[in-house]
Amino acid sequence: MIELNKDVSLTNGNLLKKILIFSLPIMASGLLQLLYNAADLIVCGQFGSDKSVAAISNTTSLVNLMVQLFIGMAVGSNVLMARSFALKDQKRAKVILGTSLIFSLVVGAILTIVGAIFAQNFLRTMKTPEEVLPLSTDYFKIYCYGFIFSMIYNFGAAMVRATGDTKRPFLYLCIAGVVNVVFNLFFVIVCKLDVKGVALGTIISEAVSAVLIIILLIRGNSLFKLRLNSFEFSKKELLELIKIGVPAGIQNSVFSIANLLIQSRINSLGKITMDADGASASIEGFVYTCMNAVAQATLVFVSANYAVGNKENIKKTVVYSVILCTIFAAISGGFVIFFGRQLLDLYIEGEQAINIGYERLVILCSTYALCGYIDIFSFAIRGIGYSITPTIVTTLGCCLYRIIWVLTIFKIERFHTNTILSLTYPISWLITSAAHLVCLIIFFKKLKNIETYA
């Protein structure tokens, strides 16, 4: 059962050590989730049709748009539960738990229906080549049916992590990861289902992780205990969750919206470039996950210390998180750059495709710390009670900038290359992280005499 360990404190002790220990299981969990998609690509690349990798790669930005939307929404539950945990407010924690799960079920169902019905329309809007459109549509439609399971897991895991327990969500993803690989191989090699098979394998694994996290919540602890026949729902907590979570979801989606436009331009460069970008995007996603884990820790620790009025610890949390993010970016980014060609060879074949993919990896992985800073600064701002500003800054710095870049610079004939598209990322990261830092400093100065949240 979930134990409320007295040694797990988010508001005192060695914060650097605690942020590191808190981040590592989240990092491992994120890497496992990425392995779902990586397994899809690798299995199809080795045992599927010659169009499978391009078909799945083409859906990546669209899948991320949907997934990042509700992962961002889970931020609201994370913040509220972290505050309740810091204040040991058992009554409010139970209400937040019930309200969050009801919200996740409703939104997950809506996204599933919308995604499944309009799958082909979305893919045509992205200018998906006709040669891979049928396979991309099959994969995305089936993948959509798993959104509700992913929604439940992410909301449930966010609330468990807010109480200091990051190990069990990781363990559940380990179990789900094994399930995913086994069913991928079975459906593709034995059943010959190609992209449909890997999509089905992903859905089954997501359902497993969702069931496990629900069982954990039902077993409960001294802070909260879920009972399926007695959900405690609160309109007030729902509005607070939406106030924090929806802007966070929109911010996460902003990246994917801009990337959808970029994906449509990648599609115009041909199948080889599509394969190369899909493989490299899968690999560099592992680098991002390492830094995003630190940002999630930032959110929980800042939220908890805001709740008890500890301004100094808020500052320390941000500084320590930036240090850890920089270290993780250097280690993971350096590893990917050093072994990039070998990693790409697991996904795709052909020297031209590998060269294109490796160039993208070098550009992004050498600058990925900037992307991590965006998450850290924006999550810290949300943790101290400002939800809208980070969304506006990210929309302008990432989405609008990339759209302008694609519609102007990329249109120039000599700049109509994948290299120019890749360069939009580090430039937008630099602009956006700097803007977030300025906002964080301004908001932090307003916390002159913060009182406890309660």
Image (cartoon, helix red, strand yellow):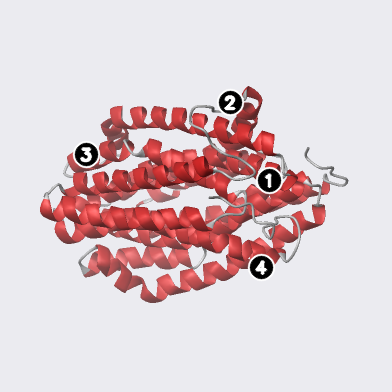
Q: Are marks 2 and 1 in contact (CB under 8 Å)?
A: no
Q: What residue is at 88 percent from the left and 45 percent from the top?
A: 449
Amino acid residing under circle 3: Asp
Please give the residue where the numbered disc 1 appears in the rendered image.
85
Q: Left or right: 76 with respect to 13?
A: left
Give the side of residue 312 with respect to residue 90, left or right: right
Q: In which quadrant of the rendered view does residue 94 lie? A: top right
Q: CA distance from mark 4 to mark 3?
A: 46 Å
Which one is in front in this view, the residue at disc 3 or the one at disc 1?
Answer: 1
Q: Label 4: state its secondary structure.
A: helix
Residue 233 is marked as: 2
How many C-alpha atoms fall within 10 Å of the one at disc 3: few (<14), some, or many (≥20)? many
Mark 3 = which residue?
Answer: 138
Cβ atoms under marks 1 and 4 closer than 8 Å: no
Left or right: residue 22 versus residue 310 is left
Amino acid carrying mark 2 in the image: Phe
Quadrant for the C terminus, please: top right
In primary-sequence order, the first of circles 4 and 3 is 4
Crowd around label 2: few <14 · some 14–19 · many ≥20 (10 Å): some
